[in-house]
Amino acid sequence: MKSFEANFDGLVGPTHNYAGLSEGNVASLKSALSISNPKSAAKQGLAKMKSLHDLGLTQGVLAPQERPDLYTLRRLGFTGNDAQVLSCAYKEAPSVLAACYSASSMWTANAATISPSADTANKKVHFTPANLTNKFHRSLEPETTGNILKAIFADEKHFEHHLHLNDSDHFGDEGAANHTRLCGEYGDAGLEIFTFGRYAFKRDMPKPQKFEARQTIEASRAIARLHGLSDDNTVFVQQNPDVIDQGVFHNDVIAVGNQNVLFIMSRLF
């Protein structure tokens, strides 16, 4: 059986906006209140996907999630028809409304952590959607993300889907943005590297002082257990807290890996 890697991009949704919702993401905070152009952004995304497809890569796309998230607004006490819910939220809680309009599901590096069949005990591809508990606007995504992944990868003979981790900051999980896999060929067993920012249950361990670390060691270890990974082929490394405080909110901001290549930016700022 031939093994290959598929690349999935998120499609920018029509409610894409710059609300500065991502504390710890320096670029997000600097862009707050800038004017967005969702149509142009979506076209740019599709052009990038087409370019990769034309290069011969297997390319997929994840549709944007439904926004504004009226279900969440009603859950938070806003009532009436859709227009009344939005109007009331705009007057009483504009920051909450901005979060419920966010098109952040476009960032598919945070969709899930995926382990290929070559690494797992039952030789299936395993999926765990990220719970994204650190940011309210992203915590709205996991259930829908899980349903999308189940619909795309539906054959139970080959794919196993897990519920996102407990909705607690102790198990804060940011998905593949903090996960790297190195291997020879894609069908070979690889080395799965989980990068975390802090220990949730050990207060005396190093952690950032300015920005909160989003990924915990507890979440990373839980995913490794769920995916049936071998201890011999799994590594857990802590991200330098000082680098997180400089704005490296996910490890993929500073490092990426594929097959036998690990690329790390030695100087970011």
Image (spheres, rainbow, N blue to C red):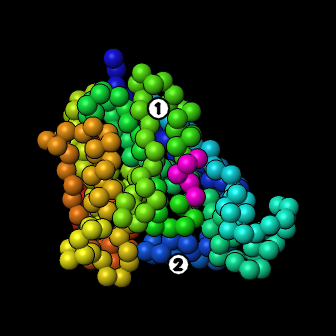
**In the image: residue 46, left or right of residue 169:** right
In the foreground, 222 or 145: 222
Looking at the rendering, in which quadrant would you find the N terminus?
Answer: top left
Residue 3 is one of the magenta-drawn residues: no
Instruction: Answer with the quarter of the image where residue 37 lies.
Output: bottom right
Can residue 10 be seen from the camera position used here?
no
Badge 1, how many Cα within 10 Å: few under 14, some, many 20+?
some
| Residue designated by label 1 | 58
Circle 2 residue: 30
| Image side of residue 191 versus residue 166, left or right | left
In depth, the one of 74 and 123 nearer the eye is 74
Is 143 a magenta residue? Answer: yes
Residue for point 45% across, 49% down: 164
Residue under the image location 68 percent in, 63 percent down: 75
Amino acid identity at mark 1: Thr
Which residue is at a point 33% across and 56% down the rendered structure image?
A: 219
Name the disc covering residue 100, or none: none
Q: Which residues are magenta?
A: 140-144
Residue 15 location (% of width, % of height): 70, 60
Whether tag 1 and tag 2 are in contact, CB under 8 A, the answer is: no
Q: Position of residue 240 (x, y in %)?
A: 24, 70
Q: Position of residue 207 (x, y in %)?
A: 27, 75
